[in-house]
Image: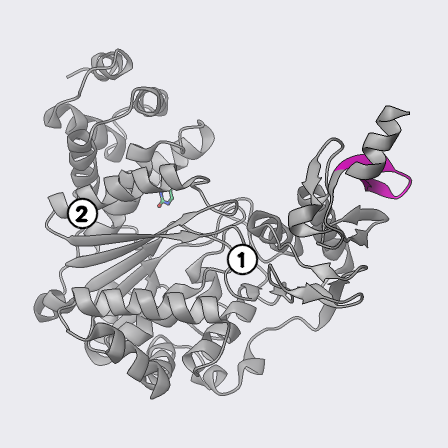
Amino acid sequence: MRAVDLIRRKRDGHILGADEITAFVQGATSRSWPDYQLAAMLMAILLRGMNAEETAVLTRAMVFSGETLDWGDLAPRAVGKHSTGGVGDKLSLILTPLAAACGAVVPKMSGRGLGHTGGTLDKLESIPGFRIGLSVDEAREVLKRIGCFMIGQTKTIAPADKILYALRDVTATVESVPLISASIMSKKLAEGVGGLVLDVKVGDGAFMKTADDARTLARMMIAIGKSQGVRTEAVLTAMEQPLGRACGNAVEVAECIEVLRGGGPSDVRELSLDFAARLVMLAGFDNARQRVEAALVGGQGLETFRRMIEAQGGDPRVVDDPTRLPLATSRHIIRAERAGIFQGWKAEAVGRAIVRLGGGRDRAEDAVDHAVGAVVLARPGERVKTGDGLLELLFRHEPRLGAALEVLVKYLAPKSGDIVDTRKTGLAWTTIFNKRVFLLPHHGEMGICRPGKRGMRILLARRWSNRRRR
Ligand code: URA
């Protein structure tokens, strides 16, 4: 079977057979297909698509490109969760120990942050000493003792995905639902779980910007999971605003500890309880919601988190004293200059600002500063007074703070010609670098953005229309 013939068939819109798809994946794994032919096939798939059957075959071939894990007598209770990624998305750190405390077995393999979205591994590595690189034997031992572990993907899990993902990243072929589905599901299916919950984020700060796209991805992944005998559920959750208040690495771990103590922001607590309950149910337990609520209130979730940290070489004292986490001491607070009802933050803007502070990475090889981040001080719909804090940036180096503020301006400053419905949202602003940004509700009129001396200003519709009449 010649690579060029398979590429031509997909390019011309044919449905590929199982042997053809398997040849493509084997060609990637053995490196017998050169990168230009792999890239051409990826582009043909992106443009022509794949049906559910082809995508299931692709996923299966990617799973069997490497090792598949088997948890022996723990396997019947082994369940997993995957998030498509967002800003402030710390749910895995809470729901993994919480579900384990209720009897589920959670062998959690996670990824690093890339682009504006954070990664569970980076958050865990802010805990002094925590090892995300356990061997499979070490991980199995922790799983037996604690009921969960949280580690990085081993090199032997779905190696075809590693090769194909790196090519997709540089050939504009990431945004393909069959390719995304096969990439995510190949790694999850190789983890040896019998039940899987997918958190498909949708909105400004997510991969999937619309609910329709998110639903298509969710349905495709559910179909793949079921075709491989894994009970699979997906939940679409909003990623317009950062999740919770803390965004970054150490600062998010501190918020997780707060939630496991029974406090923390209500959106994080509610989603953690919901996902943990789904895992516990998939692991075969009844009254799952009551169980996870009891484990939260009774502190068993927190205790499991402490034991997991200790078992993976981390300092468990962070659980009682989060100041042991590397938290930045320099702060910059962005404040409201006018009273109003706060309209909210764009998740992507906050995520990109954190990358500029050093808390995320643009390239896979970049190092991360675990101490920096942001704390959301005002939530959408909250009434703020003049001088109230809207966002706190935690930083180490002044130039990085400047770069983060520039990113916020770029993403949030209104552009000339933007129409603002102040009847719904009112109007107020703050100033960064002499530029007005962030619209805050106040007046209740329509307005249009126009350049002014101090950056963009908003001309209210009343004056705007008077002027046009004159
Ligand atoms: N996450 C993955 O693991 N793969 C993709 O293709 C997209 C997001």
Question: Circle 2: is it few (<14), some (14-19), or many (20+) Cα within 10 Å?
Answer: many
Q: CA distance from mark 2 to mark 1?
A: 29 Å
Between 39 and 434, the residue placed more toward the observer is 434
Which residue position is annotated with label 2? 225
* Residue 94 falls within the magenta-colored stretch: no
Start and end of the magenta stretch? 448-460
* Residue 454 falls within the magenta-colored stretch: yes
Question: Circle 1: is it few (<14), some (14-19), or many (20+) Cα within 10 Å?
Answer: many
The spot of residue 311 in percent (x, y) is: 33, 79
Which residue position is annotated with label 1? 242
What residue sits 73% from the left and 45% below the top?
445
Q: Quadrant of ligand 1?
A: top left
Labels 2 and 1 touching (C-beta < 8 A): no
On screen, residue 194 versus residue 152, left or right, reads left
The spot of residue 303 in percent (x, y) is: 35, 85
On screen, residue 271 versus residue 384, left or right, reads left
On screen, residue 269 versus residue 63, left or right, reads right
Q: Is residue 392 visible?
A: no
Snapshot quadrant of residue 92 = bottom left
On screen, residue 375 versus residue 319, left or right, reads right
Three-letter amino acid code at the position of disc 2? Gly
Between 191 and 441, the residue placed more toward the observer is 441
The spot of residue 360 in percent (x, y) is: 56, 54
Q: Is residue 98 visible?
A: yes
The spot of residue 391 in percent (x, y) is: 68, 62
Quadrant occupied by the C terminus = top right
What element does badge 1 sit on?
Answer: loop
Quadrant occupied by the N terminus = top left
